[in-house]
Amino acid sequence: MSCAASDPPGRSRAGAPALVPPTRVTRGDGGIEELLAGGDERCARLLRELTSGALWEVELGFGKGRYLLRRAAEDPDLRFLGIEMVGDYFRLAARRARRRALRNLTLLQGEALYLLAAVLPREFASAVHAYFPDPWPKARHHRRRLYDRETIDLVLGLLRPRGRIFFASDHPQYGPEVAELLAGRCELEVAHHAGSWDDGPRTNYEAKYVAQGRPIVRLEATLIAPAGGPCRSVLSAVPLPHDP
């Protein structure tokens, strides 16, 4: 794998969103590096870290870093990778990580779909988190979604056996659509959280929406068979109402 711009494996440029190579990487105890300026060596270093055998959790679109920073501080024996496209959020979370000396945290600024398709290794993550991603409600924009029929294999490909997906959305169409998408994959066992997460709101958006009483779909899915491979339909059927 390389950080250089290229067509991701298994995806065509035709009809696909513009794919932006990753630009910056930072670790909790260091400065921000320009990933492309470092050439293949910086990419190779990143891949060595991700495939070292350590337990990694990934957050796609970490925003201001509320959940990721807290988890990295609470679980120093785990490794955490965060991906964020917005430069201001990336720099804010990077400053906070450095102040807290979170040596088990790596942040990438770049487009998640590009990173999943062309840079990150397969089967290295014990958990993938995505909270309140952009629903891209217009039909012509659905291909930009993190969780869509055309992109779900990229997300599942990150997971180790028995790895888990955590997802939340307040969007009245997108949340149930993702629930249906995950429930339709026989390699996943899907559960719906009817109330809050055990550790409370995980993002600033979630805290705001809970205070407003807005319905939220919260999902947890476990990989019980190889992603994308043949499997028996053994997932648990779980009702998917919105919780108040």
Image: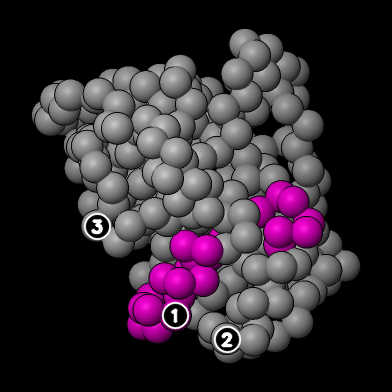
In screen coordinates, is 232 left or right of 222? left
Q: Amino acid at mark 1?
A: Ala
What's the residue at 22%, 37% (across, down)?
194
Identify residue for label 2.
Answer: 100
Above or below, 174 against 33 in this view is above
Q: Amino acid at mark 3?
A: Asp
Q: Quadrant of the N terminus?
A: bottom right
Residue lying furthest right:
37
Tell me if mark 1 has few (under 14), some (14-19) or many (20+) residues whose alpha carbon lies within 10 angstroms of its own: some
Name the N-terminal-most of marks 3 and 2. 2
Magenta-drawn stretch contains 133:
no
Q: Quadrant of the C terminus?
A: top left
In the picture, the disc for residue 198 is 3
Please tell me whether mark 1 sits on a helix, a strand or a loop: helix
| Disc 3 from disc 2: Cα separation | 24 Å
What's the residue at 37%, 22% (across, down)?
176
Could you tell me residue 148's position as x and y percent?
A: 50, 25
What's the residue at 70%, 85% (across, down)?
30
Could you tell me residue 67's position as x and y percent?
A: 47, 62
Identify residue for label 1.
Answer: 73
Stretch in magenta: 66-90
Could you tell me residue 193's position as x and y percent?
A: 24, 40
- Say if residue 160 shows up in the picture: no
| Disc 2 from disc 1: Cα separation | 8 Å
